[in-house]
Amino acid sequence: GAVVSQHPSWVICKSGTSVKIECRSLDFQATTMFWYRQFPKQSLMLMATSNEGSKATYEQGVEKDKFLINHASLTLSTLTVTSAHPEDSSFYICSASGGWTKNIQYFGAGTRLSVL
Amino acid sequence: AQSVTQPDIHITVSEGASLELRCNYSYGATPYLFWYVQSPGQGLQLLLKYFSGDTLVQGIKGFEAEFKRSQSSFNLRKPSVHWSDAAEYFCAVGASGGSNYKLTFGKGTLLTVNP
């Protein structure tokens, strides 16, 4: 299967600071990338969908200015949590699809964000 | 709008026993169906998928799933469970066509395997 790398796997930051999470497709061109948030013992909640070179499409209720998504190349998308607060603490997972992956989303290993 | 129901929140089986995880979906057209597995603190790994064709699909790690349109189901099965299969399992449905489709996930089923 396709390989998606997500970095960092765990980050701790102070309240009010910004954190950037990277998602890379290593062996395919990801025309579309997705960002999910997962609360403990719960399912994945789609936050936004991004197409390479275009602005991200956010799901209802997700703050665009809080969660900045950039998909500037076919192998890299970033999620920046701006002015993070403790309630932003969560597990964030990206997925990617495109090229030979044929409508299948391949997932990164996730990033655990803890805001103090 | 599409939706997925996984009726079982938690299932416990003994190692070597057979396993069936249930998944029901709601979607107006032909769905793309997926089963993913998530180990603690990890991302999701694709077990298998159904797009079209043979309704019994084989996946990795000895898993299989059967698409039953009449029952709107896509249950996951394994004939003999291994301790390493303990994890959270998610069923998902995607809109057919295009690469911008969204996945809708069920709430997941946590599998515990007793020795």
Image (spheres, helix red, strand yellow):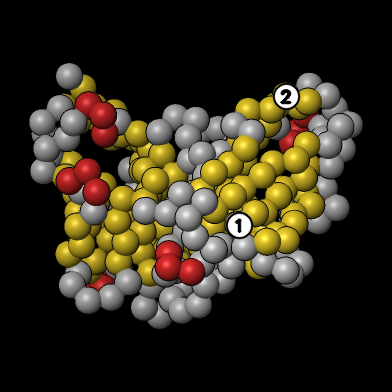
Q: Nearer the viewer, residue A44 or A29?
A: A29
Q: Residue furthest top?
A: B115
> Which of labels 2 and 1 is toward the front?
1
Residues under labels 2 and 1: Cα distance?
26 Å
Q: Is B62 on the left-hand or right-hand side of A45?
A: left
Local SS, label 1: loop
The residue wearing badge 1 is A75
The residue wearing badge 2 is A12
Q: Identify which residue is drawn at 22% across, 26% down.
A: B83
Residue type at tag 2:
Ile
Residue type at tag 1:
Thr
**Where in the figure is residue A69, as x and y percent of width and height?**
74, 55
Quarter residue A64 falls in: bottom right
| Contact, mark 2 vs mark 1 (Cβ under 8 Å) | no
Q: Nearer the viewer, residue A86 or B9?
A: A86
Q: Chain of mark 2?
A: A
Local SS, label 2: strand
Sequence-wise, which precedes: disc 2 or disc 1?
2
Q: Chain of mark 1?
A: A
Q: Identify which residue is drawn at 18% across, 31% down.
A: B82
Q: Residues within 10 Å of mark 1 (few under 14, many from 20)?
A: many
Task: Give the answer, above or below, for where A73 lies relative to B6.
Answer: below
Q: Is A54 on the left-hand or right-hand side of A45?
A: right
Task: Give the answer, above or below, for where B60 lies relative to A32.
Answer: above
Q: Identify which residue is drawn at 74% across, 70% down.
A: A54
Q: Which quarter shows the C terminus of chain B?
A: top left
**Where in the figure is residue B110, as x and y percent of width and height?**
36, 35
Q: Is A102 on the left-hand or right-hand side of B24?
A: right
